Image (tube, rainbow, N blue to C red):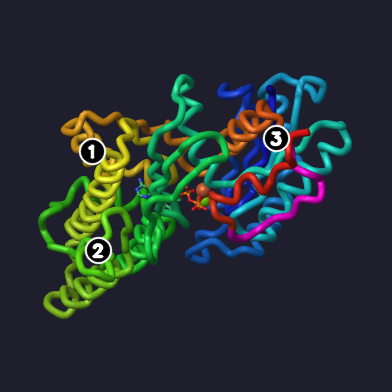
Amino acid sequence: ATVLAIETSCDETAVAIVKNRKVCSSIVASQILVHQQYGGVVPEVASRQHLEIINEAIAQALEQAELDWGKIDAIAATCAPGLVGALLVGLTAAKTLAMVHNKPFLGVHHLEGHIYATYLSESTLNPPFLSLLVSGGHTSLIYVKDCGNYETLGQTRDDAAGEAFDKVARLLKLGYPGGPVIDKLAQEGNPQAFALPEGRVSLPGGGFHRYDASFSGLKTAVLRLVQQLEKDNGQLPVADIAASFQDTVARSLTKRAIACALDYGLDTIAIGGGVAANSGLRKNLQAAAAKHNLRVLFPPLKFCTDNAAMIGCAAADHLSRGHTSPLTLGVESRLGLTQVMKLYQPVE
Ligand code: ATP
Ligand code: MG
Ligand code: FE
C-alpha cells in the first residue's frame, strides 16, 4: 500500500510517502538551528515550528513523489511517545487529511517506526531479530517477534545514550546536539587516555544485569574528570576525553547487544536511532558481531534519526494486516512498545 506519513514527535517536522518498504519521497525539516540557541529542545517552540511548516512539508512530499491524493491508500502519523504538543500537530493533520480524502488512518508508535527504519534498506529482512535502539530519549534492546509484537529485553536505567552524548558535550562546551561533535573529536583522541566506568546495573541477588545499561554514572565521572583536569592545569584534552567517553559507551552497548542476541539465539542485530550514526559504536559492534557470526544492520544515516519514511513503513505493514486506528485516537507522551496493538481497531 502507498502511505503518506507524518512525524512530529520531537524537533523534526517530517513527511514521507512510502510504498510498503520503498521510499517515494521523504521530507525532513530539522529545527536544530532554532533550538540550538537554548541548548536543547524547547517543547513550546517545537509545536509552533511544526504548525508553521507542516502544510508545506506535506505539499513537498506529494510533489517529490509525483503523486496526488488519488494514489494514496492511507494516512499515518506518530501518536506516541513524544512531546504532547508536537505530536498533536502531526496527528491532527493526518486525521484531518484522512477525513477530507476519505482514507484509512493509522497512528504509529515512534519506536516501532525506528525499528522499521531497517526495512527501508533491507527489504528482505523479516522477524525475528534483535533491535538495538539508541536515540536521544531511548536505549533499548528489543526482541522483534512480528509486526506489533515486541519484547523489551534490556534498557537504560537512567540516561539514554544520545542524552549522555548531549550532556557530556554540554559540559565540554561543545554545543547541541552533542553526538556528532563528540564523534568527530573522538577520531583525533586516544580512547585509552582515561579509564571511565562503564555503568553496570546491579542485580538484587548479586552480580550485574546482562542487558540493562546505565549512563548517568559515566556522565558524572566525566564531570569529575573535567573538574580535576581544570584544577590541575586548565588546558582540557578535549579529544582524549571525547574518545574515552565514546569508547566506553560503544563497549557497553556492544557487550549488551551481543550477549542478548546470543542468549536468545537471534542471528541479526538491527541498530536504529541517532546514536547508530556513531563511528565508535559501528566499529565496535561490527567487530564483535563478526567474532560471533552475527549480522549487524545499520540503516542509512537519514533513516536512523527521526524521519517519516520509517513511520510510513510501519503503517503500511499494519494496514496489510487490516489494522487501522479510530479517528478518536489521541496522543500519549509515554507508551510502552508492548502497547502498540492498542492503537488499532480489532479486524472485523
Ligand atoms: P527518541 O527517538 O528516543 O524519541 P530522538 O528521536 O530525539 O529520541 P534521534 O533523533 O533518533 O533521537 O537521535 C538524536 C540523538 O542522536 C541526539 O542525542 C544526538 O546527540 C545523537 N547522535 C546523533 N549523531 C550521533 C553520533 N554520530 N554519535 C553519537 N550520537 C549521535
Ligand atoms: Mg531529533
Ligand atoms: Fe526518534
Location of residue 83 (image quadrant): bottom right
Amino acid of disc 2 = Arg
Which numbered marker is on residue 283?
A: 1
Amino acid of disc 3 = His
Q: Is mark 1 within 8 Å of ligand 1?
A: no
Q: Residue 328 in magenta?
A: yes
* Quadrant assignment for the C terminus: top right
Mark nearer the viewer, 3 or 1:
3
Q: Is residue 45 above or below residue 25?
A: below
Of labels 3 and 1, earlier in sequence is 1
Of labels 2 and 1, earlier in sequence is 2
Name the residue nearer the viewer: 259 or 107. Answer: 259
Task: Give the residue drawn at x 11%, y 55%.
Answer: 192
Q: Magenta segment, principal secondary structure?
A: loop
Q: Which residues are magenta?
A: 323-334
Name the residue nearer the viewer: 53 or 244. Answer: 244
Amino acid of disc 1 = Lys
How many angstroms separate mark 3 from mark 1 (CA)? 39 Å
Query: Residue beneath label 2, please?
Result: 200
Query: Residue beneath label 3, please?
Result: 323
In the image: residue 222, left or right of residue 328: left
Helix, strand or loop status at disc 3? loop
Label 1, residues with CA under 10 Å away: few <14, some 14-19, many ≥20: few
Q: Residue 22 in magenta?
A: no
Task: Give the residue drawn at x 63%, y 44%.
Answer: 341
Label 2, residues with CA under 10 Å away: few <14, some 14-19, many ≥20: many
In the image: residue 250, left or right of residue 232: right
Of labels 2 and 3, earlier in sequence is 2
